[in-house]
Image (cartoon, grey):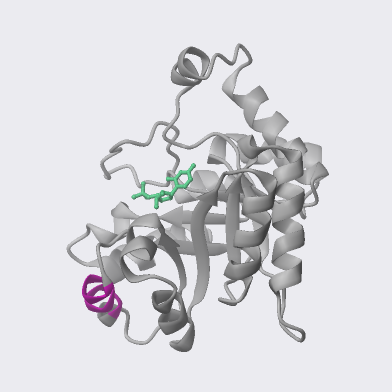
Amino acid sequence: MKNSLIIALDFTGKEEVNSFLSKFNDEQLFLKVGMELFYQEGPRIVQELKEKGHQIFLDLKLHDIPNTVGKAMERLARLQIDLVNVHAAGGKEMMERALAGLEAGTLSGQKRPHLIGVTQLTSTSEEQMQKEQLISATLKESVLQYASLTKEAGLDGVVCSAFESEEIKRLLGSEFLTVTPGIRTAADEQGDQKRIATPAFAKEAGASAIVVGRSITNDPNPLEKYKQMKSQWEGVLQ
Ligand SMILES: O=c1ccn([C@@H]2O[C@H](COP(=O)(O)O)[C@@H](O)[C@H]2O)c(=O)[nH]1
């Protein structure tokens, strides 16, 4: 899990996924299945990708009452995913129940999937957060508060931007995972993301893993772009 570059498979269906993955010459990847793909294809897509030897981050960002999230996590654990998440804004009790559900659903002999909490989405700016969520703290303070709550609930780490990773590791320990989306090279379009950083910046900030979607999936040569970003992430200059 640590030091992974996770590719976000934000596609409308299985055909698009297969056509994208065919360019990777059977390379074993860490793939993120999000709402768009999961709602279209259902749990079967996760099973198919696992059967091909890929690791899976199931990014469904659960956020509901503790009982519902706990029960849902118990079901998701059966998919033998590697990483899954909830919104930290759901609260400590909800996160504790999510973890308990995941543990209860993990089959004996299998490893429990890592569970992380989303802090503030990387598409949120400080100004938006303060105006729309009526939070008067700085964005970093809000992220750190959610990260602390996530750790208190016993989770393995958080989703945050690369800008908060270093501080989270300093406060909560180097083993606490920071998974950072909003990753772009200098040439890429920002799109709807607000807190973007390069793979090299994320590495410098001690991020545990980076999540890259459109920079790779929209590139005319996704394999080359993947290799380029991976080598920047791994600290090999290109
Ligand atoms: O705070 C968050 C949490 C999740 N994401 C997800 O990561 C990818 C990023 O895609 P890009 O195309 O590289 O912007 C996407 O699937 C999001 O759902 C995030 O961006 N920020």
Q: Is residue 100 left or right of residue 222?
A: right
In percent of width and height, residue 38 lies at 39, 64
- Label tally: 0
| Image vertical order of residue 54 relative to residue 102, above or below | below
Segment colored magenta: 14-21
* Image coords of residue 165 (percent x, y): 63, 41
Give 227 or 153, whichever is nearer the viewer: 153
In the current view of this chain or complex, which residue is farthest to the front? Answer: 67
The residue closer to the viewer here, 214 or 69, is: 69
Residue at x 46% of width, y 88% of height: 51
Residue 142, image x, y percentages: 64, 25
- Residue lying furthest left: 220
Q: Position of residue 222 (x, y in %)?
A: 26, 66
Q: Quadrant of residue 26?
A: bottom left
- Residue 17 lies in the magenta stretch: yes
Dominant SS type (magenta): helix
Asked if the stretch drawn in magenta spans residue 167, the answer is no
Left or right of residue 142: residue 191 = left
Residue drawn at the location 55% of the way across and 64% of the way down: 4
